[in-house]
Image: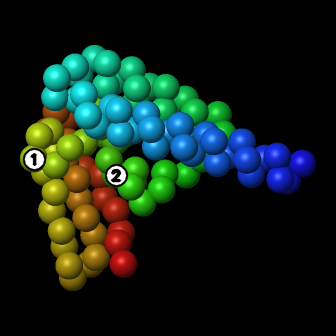
Amino acid sequence: MERKKGIVERIANERVAILFSMAEKCIATEPELSASYVNILEHIMKHYHLKPDSRLKGRICKHCHVVLVPGFNCTVRIRSSSKIVAYTCSKCKSDMRILYG
Ligand SMILES: [Zn+2]
């Protein structure tokens, strides 16, 4: 049972990673398509109770659910004193803060 669960989670994680890179690639050219990829991705994560990995953390806006691409639709600030990376969504101005290190 435990083994089967592990495999399912691994496949779900792979799909999330694929969907994320697809959403990232088309955000500039086809934002609507990108949004639907994010929608599917978030459904998978919710369904399998997946936690975002380091690549995904803070990279999807919690408010408007868009993929955040630094220099395109978000700004990144690093506070080395508190070890926080803040991604600010240009659309809704909300902050996604991640601890690093
Ligand atoms: Zn936003």
Give left or right: position of 81 versus 51.
left
Crowd class of label 1 (few under 14; some 14 to 19; many from 20; radius 10 Å): few
Give left or right: position of 79 versus 11.
left
Q: Is residue 45 above or below residue 31?
A: below
For residue 64, say whether it is visible.
no
**Quarter holding residue 20:** top left
Residue 35: image x %, image y %?
Answer: 33, 24
- Going 36% across and 78% down the picture, which residue do you hit? 101
Q: Is residue 55 above or below residue 24?
A: below
**Quarter holding residue 99:** bottom left
Residue type at the position of mark 1: Gly
Give 26 or 71, whichever is nearer the viewer: 26
Residue type at the position of mark 2: Gly
- Going 16% across and 49% down the picture, which residue do you hit? 70
- Going 20% across and 44% down the picture, which residue do you hit? 69
Distance in Å between CA atoms under marks 2 and 1: 15 Å
* First-in-chain label (2 vs 1): 2
- Going 72% across and 42% down the picture, which residue do you hit? 8
Which residue position holds label 2?
Answer: 58
Q: Is residue 99 above or below residue 72?
A: below
**Quarter holding residue 82:** bottom left
**Which label is found at residue 71?**
1
Are the residues flagged by discs 2 and 1 in contact, CB closer than 8 Å? no
Residue 32: image x %, image y %?
Answer: 28, 17
Give 18 or 53, whichever is nearer the viewer: 18
